[in-house]
Image (cartoon, rainbow, N blue to C red):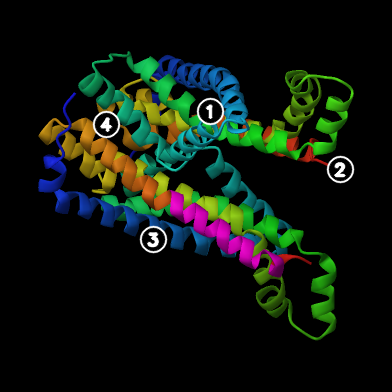
Amino acid sequence: MTLDWSVVWDNRWRLIAGAEMTVILTATTMALALPGGLLLALLRLSHVRLVRSSTTGFVEFFRATPLILQIYWIFYVLPAAFDIRLSEFVTALLGLSLNVSSFNSETFRAGILSIRPGQWNAALALGMTKPQVLRKIILPQATLRVLPALASTWVSLFKDTSLVSIIAVADLSYVSLKIRSETYRVLEVLTAMGALYCLMGYPQAKLVDWMHRRFKVVE
Amino acid sequence: MDIDISPLIENWQFILTGLGFTLALSALSIALGAAIGLVGGVLRTYGGKLLDSAIGLYVDVVRSIPVLAILVWTYFAFPLVIGESLTPFSGGVLALGVHLGAYITETIRAGLTSIRPGQMRAALALGMSRFEAIRTIILPQALIRMLPPLGSLIVIAVKDSAIASVIAVPELLRQSQVLAGKTFRPFEIYTAAMLIYFLICYPTARTIDRVYRRLGVLGAS
């Protein structure tokens, strides 16, 4: 077996562009899924039973089905059944955001519920309104506590963006698989793809481990 | 929009085959992952510095690469290294198992280190060997404590098995794609597939929660 690594170097700009798309997808999805997750978490703590149960259903459904199928569903079913046409990039963003919002909502909910109810009582006794208590007392503490969990979700999301390559969004996976089929240098290109993901993912994973140690909840 | 479920009824065997492959792929990759994780977790905790850093490298590398990349590498590139081709199914089991194994290794290690070191010392003082102490005292408690994260890993394994559709394992998602292409009824078919995955994953997660609530006390110390 002869290896020819020049194929990786020759296509470096395409690979870098793919890696850029991966980062853009991760960052944009998270920017949408943080408010999305917080909204879902608040809806799940609502006093209206119907709101609570339908949000729970939504979240559980997205958490218990494969992301790759969710992306397919949006990509094939929306145009065919509902005549909604979205670009590949928007489809990818929609699928990833709905999925990550569901996971974030569980994180936020756990964070909000982890604050002792005495704090609610104390704040209400001081004459604050419920939204005020939430905004000024509960959320700042809860957010700090769930920071490590959100960071773990970020790393999972970074890796999960590779799934959008199946609907031809030009991320690192899609570009690599394309170069592979053009050049037939399977081993070199696929190894480079793994290495590039590792190069980007490894520092993030280490940072998350550090955050878990640093922000450990001590009560 | 009109809904027509006849493609589902006419092709129920085709879908059932897919479901069978999904379950087999998940079960085998969980078995492989559990074997790797058990050995890896124990060796990382008790096997000395060298093994700890070697297994740590495996864990960190696998944790920073997407499953998709591991799957395509195992199926397309790995055969070139070993000079032997893999079937999509065995490639899928291998890739998913090695991927899951890294996460199980970390989970088991966390469980083992959470057991107070006094227990190991007490067992050794009673004349047990290290291996005996791990097998009969430390590991059982650690496994019960780690039931919730291990449970979510099982659910993740079932969901990740759908990604094996990219290397043409004829599992549920792959069969659905073929069927959707043939019948032009993507709505009915993908929705049905979604429901089937939900009916596997959601009860699994709830069952593990319930088991943990019953057994959790046994892991407390």
Camera-side residue of B112 and A44: A44
**Marking on residue B28:** 3
Disc 4 and disc 3: Cα gap in Å? Answer: 31 Å
* Residue on which disc 1 sits: A101
Disc 1 and disc 4: Cα gap in Å? Answer: 39 Å
Which mark is nearer the camera, 4 or 2? 2
Q: Along the polypeptide, which appears first: circle 2 or circle 1?
A: 1
**Marking on residue A219:** 2
Residue B105 visible in the picture: no
Q: Which residues are magenta?
A: B202-218
Q: Are marks 2 and 1 in contact (CB under 8 Å)?
A: no
The kind of secondary structure element at disc 4 is: loop
* Residue on which disc 4 sits: A184
**Amino acid under label 3?**
Leu
- Residue A182: % across, % down: 26, 24
The main secondary structure of the magenta stretch is helix
